[in-house]
Image (cartoon, rainbow, N blue to C red):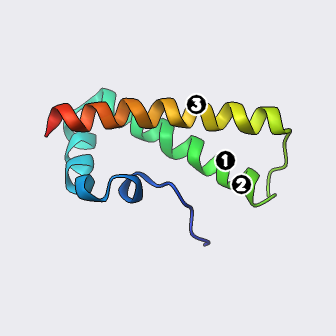
């Protein structure tokens, strides 16, 4: 399997253990992390041309991923 960039552990390497713990402890965080993971995989398939789509759709997905990442980052900063 090829490397998928932008995984949460890569985006927040200093918080890898906290991410794992929050996935276990906090249902909302776990849902956000799952949504981020699925969206990130979809974007990767688009970027690698496995799943072609329009530029508009790709940009919309990237915006959604950024919103999720921002919410996850906020939760990580308050959970520390």
Residue at coordinates 35% horizontally, 35% vertically from top-left? 72
Q: Residues within 10 Å of mark 1 (few under 14, many from 20)?
A: many
Furthest toward the left, the residue is 80
Task: Read off the residue under disc 3.
Answer: 64
Q: CA distance from mark 1 to mark 3?
A: 11 Å
- Expressed as whole percent of the image width and height from the top left, the position of residue 55 reads 82, 39
- The C terminus appears in which quarter of the rendering? top left
Q: Is residue 20 above or below residue 10?
A: above
Q: CA distance from mark 2 to mark 1?
A: 5 Å
Dot 2 or dot 3, earlier in sequence:
2
Q: CA distance from mark 2 to mark 3?
A: 16 Å
Task: Read off the residue under disc 2.
Answer: 45
Task: Read off the residue under disc 1.
Answer: 43
Depth check: give the residue in front, 46 or 1. 46
Q: Are marks 1 and 3 in contact (CB under 8 Å)?
A: no
Rendered image: mark on residue 9: none
């Amino acid at each position: 399997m090829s490397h998928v960039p932008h995984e949460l552990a890569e985006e927040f390497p200093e918080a890898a253990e906290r991410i794992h713990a929050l996935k276990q402890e906090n249902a909302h965080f776990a849902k956000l992390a799952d949504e981020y993971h699925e969206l990130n995989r979809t974007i990767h398939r688009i970027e690698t041309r496995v799943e072609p789509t329009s530029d508009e759709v790709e940009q919309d997905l990237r915006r959604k991923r950024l919103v999720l990442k921002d919410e996850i980052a906020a939760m990580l900063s308050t959970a520390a």
